[in-house]
Amino acid sequence: MQAGAKVKAIIEALPNEGGFPVQANRVRRLGIPVLTSHILLKALPNEAHDGITGAVVAGCRNFKAIPGTEKVIEGIDAINICTGLVCDDQLLIKGNEIFGRNCFGAGDAIRIGEGTSAVLKGKQVAFEILQEMGEKFDYDEYLSLSKEYIDSQQHPLRLITDPYLPSKERMNEKGFVLIDCLYGFACNPCAFACPNGAITKSSNQRCPGDRFR
């Protein structure tokens, strides 16, 4: 949607979203239906057979379609199919074969994770490259960064029940940002993106929305 696409629906074969609820809530607020326990059966071609006009989906159980639940989603021209999250480490492996320890990896070449873990791993790798080059750097900063990266790999726990909300008077006054990160994990794109520095987040497994103005 940020690129201008009009998303008709998100189909998920599992009975629940596979990611964090904050992402699912975000697309729902945009009016995009999230159809859990559904599976894609086939695409409907256009007359020229060089594109599509719709898709047939059905309810499913254990990744198998339930007969009689088929329905058509019309008015679409593209289907984006996600087949799972697997590390793409082939380039890193080839680099290690050719260059040995002179090759370093970050992001999805190391581990599938949310964006913050990729940013942290990239910074950590920069320190590792400096160390390999024999350059001086702040080792305490490296240790602190490494702790943040480790924290970002932990399985999150739900820490708060409901999103933080301003008072009714404030809500009625003008629009406000709803931060509904209910789980304690080290994802903090909100802190990265805020141009005013109004959102801060530590790495000690607290909710990213624990401190905002």
Image: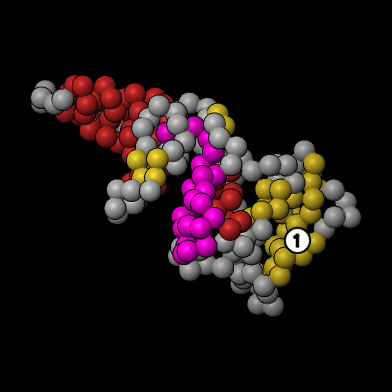
Quarter of the figure with residue 27: bottom right
* Residue 178 on the magenta segment: yes
- Res. 91 in view: no
Q: Which residues are magenta?
A: 163-186
Nearer the observer, 25 or 47: 25
The residue sitting at 47% across, 64% down in the picture is: 174
The residue sitting at 14% across, 26% down in the picture is: 137
Judge whether 54 appears above or below 39 on screen. Answer: below
Q: Secondary structure at mark 1?
A: strand
- Res. 170 in view: yes
The residue sitting at 79% across, 50% down in the picture is: 59
- Three-letter amino acid code at the position of disc 1: Val
Nearer the observer, 17 or 130: 17
Q: Residue furthest right?
A: 68
Quarter of the figure with residue 77: bottom right
Residue at image mark 1: 56
Q: Residues within 10 Å of mark 1 (few under 14, many from 20)?
A: some
| Relative to 177, 126 lies left or right | left
The kind of secondary structure the magenta stretch mainly shows is: loop
Q: Position of residue 190 (x, y in %)?
A: 39, 47
Quarter of the figure with residue 110: top left
Q: Position of residue 26 (x, y in %)?
A: 55, 53
Nearer the observer, 36 or 43: 36
Number of marks: 1
Q: Position of residue 193 (x, y in %)?
A: 34, 51
The residue sitting at 75% across, 46% down in the picture is: 37
Judge whether 99 appears above or below 68 on screen. Answer: above
